[in-house]
Amino acid sequence: MYTIQLNEKGSRHLDISDDNLKTIQKYHLFRDLVDSHGYVTEDVLTKLRMTVRALIAQNEKNTKDLLDLCIDVIYHNDMKAFGLHNLILLFIDWEQNHQPVTDEQLPPEVF
């Protein structure tokens, strides 16, 4: 579990789970999200929300992870551009330090 700051004053925080970060990675939600200027604005947050809506509408049956991400993070009442910026920074750090488990690393099955 990770915590990000949602406002500049530091009075609002949001807990982010590994599952939330895995969902972002699975659907490549941050790919090409921020324009070339590099600023995270409210428009970028709106773009992310629209992308997630489209993914849910496109694949209605297997979207529990996306719905959880929406409820917990993307559509959180306090989520603004500042919080999204911190979420992106957390995701970058998590992705660099996250070692995905491969089939070779799994223990052998016991019968």
Image (tube, grey):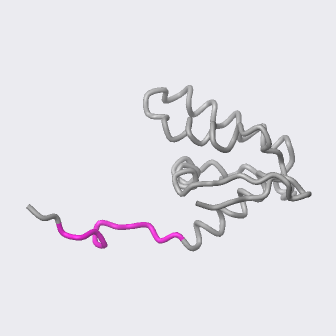
Rendered location of residue 51, percent (x, y): 66, 37
Q: Is residue 88 left or right of residue 40?
A: left
Give the quadrant of the N terminus. Answer: bottom right
Q: Which of the 4 image quadrants contains residue 49?
A: top right
Which residue occupies the foreground of this view, 57 or 2? Answer: 2
Range of residues picked out in magenta: 98-108
Q: Which of the 4 image quadrants contains residue 80?
A: top right
Q: Is residue 33 left or right of residue 64?
A: right
Q: Is residue 82 left or right of residue 50?
A: right
The residue positioned farthest toward the left in the image shown? 111
> Main SS type for the magenta part?
loop
Count the marks.
Answer: 0
Residue at x 78% of width, y 44% of height? 79
The residue positioned farthest toward the right in the image shown? 9
Asked whether 101 falls inside the magenta stretch, the response is yes
Give the quadrant of the C terminus. Answer: bottom left
Rendered location of residue 11, percent (x, y): 85, 54
- Vertical side of 14 occupied by 53: above or below: above
Residue at x 73% of width, y 49% of height? 33
Rendered location of residue 78, percent (x, y): 80, 42
- Vertical side of 72 occupied by 9: above or below: below
- Vertical side of 53 occupied by 44: above or below: below
Residue at x 63% of width, y 54% of height? 16
Residue at x 56% of width, y 30% of height? 56
Asked whether 36 falls inside the magenta stretch, the response is no
Rendered location of residue 37, percent (x, y): 87, 57
The residue positioned farthest toward the front in the image shown? 11
Q: Which of the 4 image quadrants contains residue 92?
A: bottom right
